[in-house]
Amino acid sequence: MGALWAGVTGLTTYSQSIGVTSNNLANVNTIGYRRSYALFDDLMSQNATSSSGNAQIGLGVQLSNILNSYRTGGMETTTTSMDMAIQGDRGFFQVRDSGSGNLYYTRAGAFRFDNSGYLVDTNGYRVQGWAVDQDAVAAAKANGVTLSRTPTTGGVTDILLNQLRIDGRATSNLSVITNLDSTTSSRVNDPVNPFFTMFQSYNYDPADPDASLVSNASYQTSITVYDSQGQKRELTLTYSKALTDSGKEYWEYMVSMDPAEDGRAITAGTSKAGVLMIGTLTFNDDGTMDNMTAFTLSETASSAASLGSWVPADLTAGGLPQFSATFLSASGGGALAPVTMSTNLGISSANGWGAAMPATAAGMGTSTANTLGINSADVTLAANATTNYATTSYTLTYNQNGYGEGYLIDVSVNGSGVVTGSFSNGQDVGLYVVSLADFVNADGLRREGNNLFSATPDAGAKIEGAPGTGIFDKVAGYTLESSNVDMSTEMVMLITGQRALQSNTKVVTTADEMMKKALEIKR
């Protein structure tokens, strides 16, 4: 009888094992599926009479446990930006059933936005993440700080795409790097203020707005910026070669706006309307920049035409000169809020203006010593700076950080799990960071079907984190993780399970024959 029941346990157990293998094979193409495998225990043995007195006969086998393999499956490239795959063995995406509030865990990253804007899985459960702290990102960008990771705010929440538009942003930083041709002939200078001859010649006539503003410019370039309402405006940088002295070249430069758009009370409608900043650039004989000055109109000035009204420009923390531009509203509603912009020509001073910097532009006079706006020891020259080579003047690079309003045109996710919105104004804005979760004992998770797991007490404590941090690997967009089932392994398991089942069937039939023989003896 013992052999009969041992065979029965084998039939039962190996039937279950084959069921596990069959389920693996059935899910060989299920995205994010985790392979299962069966473990076995022998049953309690019974004592048997023997000469040694310590003989035991086993009573069969039983299913010990069914565990999961969390080895990463293959990666399949897709054409959908919100398809995601975790690139390591650890971690699950978190999704929430909005009806019950229950959290589930999955490796199947086939996510889409529903008609309410929520990022959901194929069951309609909402993907979880942290909202990006856009204020912190903007502050870091404005200060030139590179963030090692995307800052977030609040706790884990539903990822909701509700930011379909972003406002424009006024320009606060602009950079214009040029080469100014050293072979350009020097102009005829004003004998009293030779370094500001171009400024003195600048003349805006409201009655003839199309007339040339200056007559002695050597080179001119323009850059588009944005006002306080996010509207496009144009600034012009004009350069004029002043003189050559003792192996150095001196150039005058001027930053100006469209004079008809100048909303400053002191300059609007005057001959100096539009002039925002004036200054000088000094170059070494090898064409590299040596020094600079920069002047802006004093807030207490009574006339923009007087060089005595132009005072040293304020400097940023990084030592770049700043000016303020007040634009008239494009709709005719008066002056807009002033916009302060820093100007990068490739040279700066973190320690402020030097002792030789004149108190006003009028103080420049005729001495080249007054062009040393920055102490020589404090000059910081960028790798990419304005130059004075013997080649045609041209603009090498120009950029600024303002933009107009924009509308969402695309959404993507990067390796760090940052869900980023791309807007029509060329801006990419981080919206959410996808959250991942793992458990002390992942085998304690319960399969719920539909590619989902739920937490149980056996799973232990939950660990949350962003992709690429802590125990979690990065995620891949436009990618799905395939099942980690290996067909060759499962076929071997199926064959061995089948043989074991057949063997136990033979045990049962053999035991049955033995019982028949025993009954025949009785007859």
Image (cartoon, rainbow, N blue to C red):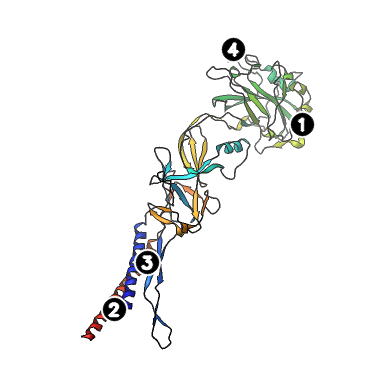
Of callouts 3 and 2, which one flags the residue occurring earlier in the amino acid sequence?
3
Q: As drawn, is 294 to the left or to the right of 36?
A: right
Tell me whether the residue at label 4 lies in contact with that at label 3, contact meaning CB atoms closer than 8 angstroms.
no
Asked if labels 2 and 3 touch by Cβ distance under 8 angstroms, the answer is no
Query: What label sits on residue 493 in the rendered view?
Result: 3
CA separation in Å, label 1 and label 3: 81 Å
Which of the two labelled residues, at mark 4 and mark 3, occupies the earlier sequence position?
4
Could you give the CA–CA distance between mark 3 and mark 2, rounded to whole angstroms?
A: 27 Å
At label 3, which amino acid type do we have?
Answer: Met
* Local SS, label 1: loop
Q: Residue furthest left?
A: 523
| 186 in relation to 97, above or below | above
- Secondary structure found at label 2: helix
Q: Which mark is residue 208?
A: 4
Mark toward the start of the polypeptide (1 vs 3): 1
Secondary element type, mark 4: loop
Sequence-first disc among 2 and 1: 1
Question: Marks 4 and 3, how far apart in space?
Answer: 91 Å
Horizontal and vertical percent position of residue 151: 57, 42
Which quadrant of the figure has residue 375?
A: top right
Q: What x and y, as percent, mark residue 255?
A: 64, 24
Along the polypeptide, which appears first: circle 2 or circle 4?
4
* Spatial CA span between label 2 and label 1: 106 Å
The residue beneath circle 2 is: 511
The three-letter amino acid code for the residue at tag 4 is Asp
Q: Quadrant of residue 246?
A: top right
Eyeballing the image, is 486 above or below 408?
below
Residue 354 image label: 1
Labels 2 & 4 near each other (Cβ < 8 A): no
Q: Residue at x 31, y 78 (%)?
A: 1
